[in-house]
């Protein structure tokens, strides 16, 4: 299988490296300030990005890191401190972030404590050399947490979703976790109405009944060398 660095962009080392830290921190503070005062993310990101001459990727990163304080408080209220016995997972969202971590590519620590990636799915996905390891880490963590049932939702319209489903079920057969994998045309819509959700998608986090921050624990424990961009505390 071809070796692939999921989410790798050569410019990231410069655009998100030590020399860019001061500019990114200042821009993030300003973006958080505007979001707290009711500006929508797109217009606020454009304004702050233009002011600091940020690249499109830097703007996207800041938009994924920052959130209004009201949204953060509500997400924190709904966050499960301990893993329940049954979880519902945003499949591609979860697996791709772990693949990016294993690839040494850029990850972002959000103000809500989640770890997000910038890989971007855009309807196409293929299983790469990091996929099996990502699935194994995920299943091992679920077992360690005492999770007995895991329901994965995968976007039906995304290429190779059937292959990923088969891989998940194959690896789960070796574990104690009872797994179901459903291909669905509107995963975001389904997850937004459920409890015990695993995702880093901000829209789903704001709408779902409760959520568990699974990937952060996996990355900190099993991939401590992962490249996670952590800005100075925001929203003060």
Image: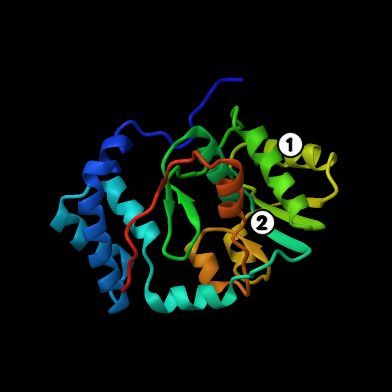
Mark 2 crowd level (few <14, some 14–19, many ≥20, 10 Å Cα): many
Residue 124 visible here = no
Q: Nearer the viewer, residue 123 or 149?
A: 149
Determine which of the numbered discs, if any, sits on residue 167 in the image. 1
User: Which residue is rendered at x = 56% and y = 54% of the image?
Assistant: 216
Q: CA distance from mark 1 to mark 2?
A: 15 Å
Give the numbered dot on residue 89. Answer: 2
Relative to 57, say whether 84 is above or below. Answer: below
Of callouts 1 and 2, which one flags the residue occurring earlier in the amino acid sequence? 2
Q: Residue at x 62, y 58 (%)?
A: 187
User: Is residue 104 toward the left or the right of residue 54 in the image?
Assistant: right
Specify whether 2 is left or right of 36.
right
At 68% from the left and 46% from the top, the residue drawn is 138
Question: Relative to 200, does residue 181 appear above or below in the rendering?
Answer: above
The local secondary structure at tag 2 comes to strand
> Which label belongs to residue 235?
none
Q: Are marks 1 and 2 in contact (CB under 8 Å)?
A: no
User: What secondary structure is found at the residue carrying circle 1?
Assistant: helix
Q: Position of residue 33 (x, y in %)?
A: 26, 72
């Amino acid at each position: 299988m071809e070796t692939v660095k999921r989410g790798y962009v050569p410019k990231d080392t410069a655009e998100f490296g030590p020399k860019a830290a001061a500019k990114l921190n200042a821009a993030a503070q300003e973006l958080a300030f505007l979001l707290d005062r009711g500006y929508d993310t797109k217009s606020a990101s454009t304004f702050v990005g233009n002011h600091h001459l940020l690249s499109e990727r830097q703007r996207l990163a800041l938009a994924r890191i920052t959130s209004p304080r009201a949204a953060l408080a509500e997400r924190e209220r709904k966050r499960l401190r301990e893993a329940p016995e049954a979880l519902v997972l945003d499949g591609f969202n979860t697996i791709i972030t772990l693949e990016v971590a294993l690839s040494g590519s850029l990850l972002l620590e959000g103000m809500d404590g989640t770890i997000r990636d910038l890989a971007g799915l855009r309807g196409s996905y293929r299983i790469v050399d990091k996929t099996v390891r990502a699935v194994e880490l995920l299943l091992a963590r679920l077992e360690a947490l005492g999770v007995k049932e895991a329901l994965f939702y995968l976007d039906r319209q995304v290429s190779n979703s059937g292959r990923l489903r088969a891989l998940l079920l194959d690896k789960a057969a070796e574990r104690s976790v009872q797994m179901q994998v459903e291909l669905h045309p509107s995963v975001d819509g389904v997850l937004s109405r459920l409890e015990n959700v695993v995702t880093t998608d901000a829209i789903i986090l704001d709408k779902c009944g409760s959520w568990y921050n699974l990937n952060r624990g996996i990355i900190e424990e099993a991939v401590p060398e992962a490249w996670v961009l952590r800005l100075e505390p925001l929203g003060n």
